[in-house]
Amino acid sequence: MKTRMSPSSTGRLISIALVLLLVVAGAAIGQKKFAGKSIRVLYFSATYADAAKEYAKEFEAQTGAKVEVVDFPYTTLYEKMGLALSSGDSSYDAVTPACQWDGEFEPFMTDLTPYINRDKFDSNDIIPGLWEQSGKWNNHIMGIPFSNTPQTLAYRTDLIKKMPTNWDDFFALCDKLNNPAKGFYALAIPGVKEQFDGLWMMVDWSIGGRWADKNWNVTIDSPETRKSLDIAKRWMKYADPAAPAWGLGESDAAFLNGNAAIAFSWPTLGIAPNGDDPAKSKVVGKWAIGLIPYEKNGVTVLSSWDIGIPKAAINKDVAWEWIKMYTSKEKQLINFQKYSILPSRISVWALPQVKNSKLYPHWQASQQGAVIWWRIPAGTMAETYVRDSVSNYITDQWDQDKAVSYMEDGFKKLLADYPPAKGVLNTGR
Amino acid sequence: MARHAAGAIRRDQQLSTFLGRPVKYVVIAVLLAIILFPLYWLVSNSFKPEQEYYHKPPIMVPIHPTTQNFVDIVVNRGLFTGLKNSLLIAVFTTLCTVLFGSLASYALVNGVLPRRLKHVFAWWFLIQKMYPAIVVAVPVFYIIRSLQLMDRVAALVLMNTSFNLPLVILLMVGFYQEAPFEVEEQSMLDGCNLLQRWFYITTPMVRAGMIATGMLTFVASWNEFLYAVILTIVRAKPLTVLIAGFITDKALVWGPMAAMGCVVVLPVVVIMWAMQRDFVSGVSAGALKG
Amino acid sequence: MLVTRTLYQSRTDKALSWVFVLPVILILLATAFIPLGWGLYLSFFRYKLNLPSATAFIGLKNYLDIFSDELTLRSLRNNAVFAGLSVSVELLVGIVLAMILSDDRRFSRVLVSILMVPMIIAPVVAGTLWRMMLDRTYGVVNYLLSFLGVPGISWIGDPKIALYTIVLVDAWQFIPFVAVLVLSSIKAMPRSFLDAARVDGASPWKVFWSIILPVTSPVIIIVAMLRFIDAFKVFDTIFVMTGGGPGNATEMLPTYIYRQGIKFLNIGYSSATAVLFVILMSAIALVFQRLRDRQLLRIG
């Protein structure tokens, strides 16, 4: 019995094998790169999450990976993210820390440098000053910033020709515009603790104040601090009496309803998306973005979010693809036009659609200087001292000395109990 | 006989002249207003279109009522998932709590355990009432994680059962103490063991108590918020977490928030209405004896 | 509190008794005792979850820090004032309400059902709803009050008023609870007491004061205890309505612990607060129990 295969059979076998190989290869190429995988990404419940949800479908179509977008409001986002990261939870493949949480979360995040180098990510396009404050920490790259929002104001163009550049002029303007008898107030202010402290901070810094110097020596007890506290208190005289209990939503609504001339806010969150929509706003075409009075240096508060990959994440490669997509030039333009998310890329800021838009003043604010407070793990605690102190002072529960000394003592104790790592300087204020 | 009837009439007279009849009607009217108005406000706001939220003066009756808010919460906010989760959590918590609670209470009253131990247990079982739940949130977070129960309805059933056991046990102990013991003694002589006695003899007797504690547990677990936030991510989110999600910095959407509030409130109101007789008698009897 | 009976010590029954208590013991072990024990252990450390490098054994320092932190004392004071006021208001109004409803035959069933509704509304919903209604400028409460000539009140924005506002909202939710329980206690009273008083010619007020009140006092005391303890655990409503503000005017112990434990992830410190809390509450519960037992003895 012949047990060897004839040459023609072998040939046939080989060709069958080759065909099979080609079919499999073809299927593999036609098959999407990450089919069957899924990632979960954590965002702040606002425009950023909405954009992510829109792109999720496109991402799945392109790569085959499912994206689950989870979002939480600011009040609970920190806790959810912090608890998940510090306990080594692998629930999330990508998270979006706010820049002020960078120092705390960095130990739990993957360094993105290898990915950036491998894929030749165009790092030069990200605004350098921004990246230093949001995404880079301790010589690691823990995230790529995707929004660059200095805190600004919104004002009524039909009532105000030019925004004042110092606080005395500012209050003179308020005196002129304030009209409580008609239910019209010069200022719309979110008075709740967590919003108001940011407002005070930007005044303090723009007139030259600092919480601590570069080397963490506490400098909060200063004339600038006292002056800025006075300014903050004075605002309340020109605001709706309900303002101390207002969140952003309520004070934005007051502005959009036409009951205020100037809105202290994060305009890109509520006012910009809705301002020119007749169904939602009574001030269509009558508003613009303004900068806070320049005084000494015009520095304002920075709100920036970066996106990164937790160390405990499971599908890191997929997450990186998501990050690249979300921070890409194309998506940043869509983010801007559709969701009022300010870009972090220099090239996008230079595009005509952005340059000619109502939100362009943010670029100027950013150039003037937008900073964040302490990004160290004790930063959240420091910010809470500020919150309580400012709020207690504004509502006349504490006098000025008490407010200042509370912050000072608090800061000192914090820095003693939880000192920043060696070599880490105070890049904020 | 006549005296008996006379006494009955006089008793009513005595109580009804407490503060006088006109005061009574005024009080009742004010009471109804204070209780029902907020509910009306909740419902009416859920039918308001966006332009009518922030009106000065406030709009009392929606001018252009719309069902858009309800549509919104179904389509955009995951109402059905939230509803499903809330229901699962509440139902299973109630079953577990009433079952385990009654068993334990019965054992405390009629079981064979050293007397001192019974008193110790009685105090231990109250432990969950002695501190705010927030206090053990982080250790619980770790425990739930290690049990692989994160973002699962089971985790919330477990926690809610734990929170409601003290009240259930407190009340059920009272009921079991009140139940006539002679019937049980008789069945013991007939050879029934503890389990048979619990199930066949005493359960019918304490039915009112079980219903009452069941309803209290249902309501409490339906309304629980803090641990729902901590222990859920996406899949197991109940309605209370969805409501909290409205408090964002984006914009104030009272309409959908009110709509969801209606959905959170309505089922328990309906259940309460249906079972109120049993509930009231159960709760009050338990408090009297406990 | 516990009346126990133990008869025939059959072995099956003995085993079954343990089986009956086992589920509860296991559940409480996993969800209460182990976390608390763990917390007790951690309370002697400086332990910040997101800064593990700073962990250190510091003995009783956390406890000392608690007493020296003025925010603790303020939270405690706010909480105590809140508890005292809300319980007082709820008892006062609840008892009066129960008295007024106790004779009524026609409406009381319906009324009681309606009365229960605030109690079953989720605190998160109630808090948001009231926050909406109490806004100084856009809120409907001030609008309605304006018809009575009352000027706009800043219910949650004014630090002097905010705490009392929370008391009112809490009272709105729980007066029904008090009323229903006291009402059933009144209805369960033996008629002979009232008849005897009537024969003596006592006025309705005297009947209330000397008979009804003492007889229902055990229930009232228990209700007061439950409300008092719950008042120290209030979280949802405050979180949603004021967040502890303005300033720290409505900061309570639970929100304070939330801040330290969840926001700051200072597990050591918040565990120490927890331990003190349990001790405090147990002491309060004990006091109320003793009071009630004494009262039960007095009325015989």
Image (tube, coloured by chain):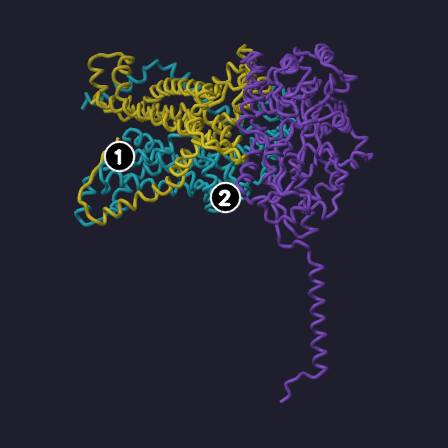
The earlier-in-sequence mark between 2 and 1 is: 1
Say if A82 sits above or below B146 in the image: above
Say if A225 sits above or below A270 in the image: above
User: What residue is rendered at 56% in x and 30% in y?
Assistant: B258
Residue labelled with disc 1: B119
- Mark 1 surroundings: few (<14), some (14-19) or many (≥20) residues within 10 A: some
Q: Residue furthest front?
A: A422
Residue labelled with disc 2: B150
Give A36 or A288, whichever is nearer the viewer: A36
- Write down which chain is painted purple: A
- Mark 2 surroundings: few (<14), some (14-19) or many (≥20) residues within 10 A: many
- In terms of image quadrants, where is residue B52? top right
Q: Amino acid at mark 2?
A: Met
Q: Amino acid at mark 1?
A: His
The location of residue B210, given as percent across then percent down, is 33, 38
- How far is disc 2 from disc 1 in space, using C-alphas? 35 Å
- In terms of image quadrants, where is residue A278? top right
The location of residue A340, given as percent across then percent down, is 72, 33
> Quick check: can you spot residue A285?
yes
Give A337 or C186, whichever is nearer the viewer: A337
Colour displayed for chain C in the image of the structure: yellow
Left or right side of B39 for A215: right
Give A174 or C275, whichever is nearer the viewer: C275
The location of residue C24, given as percent across then percent down, is 34, 41
Left or right side of A36 for A287: right
- Write down which chain is painted cyan: B
Q: Which SS class for mark 2?
A: loop
Count of numbered circles in the view: 2
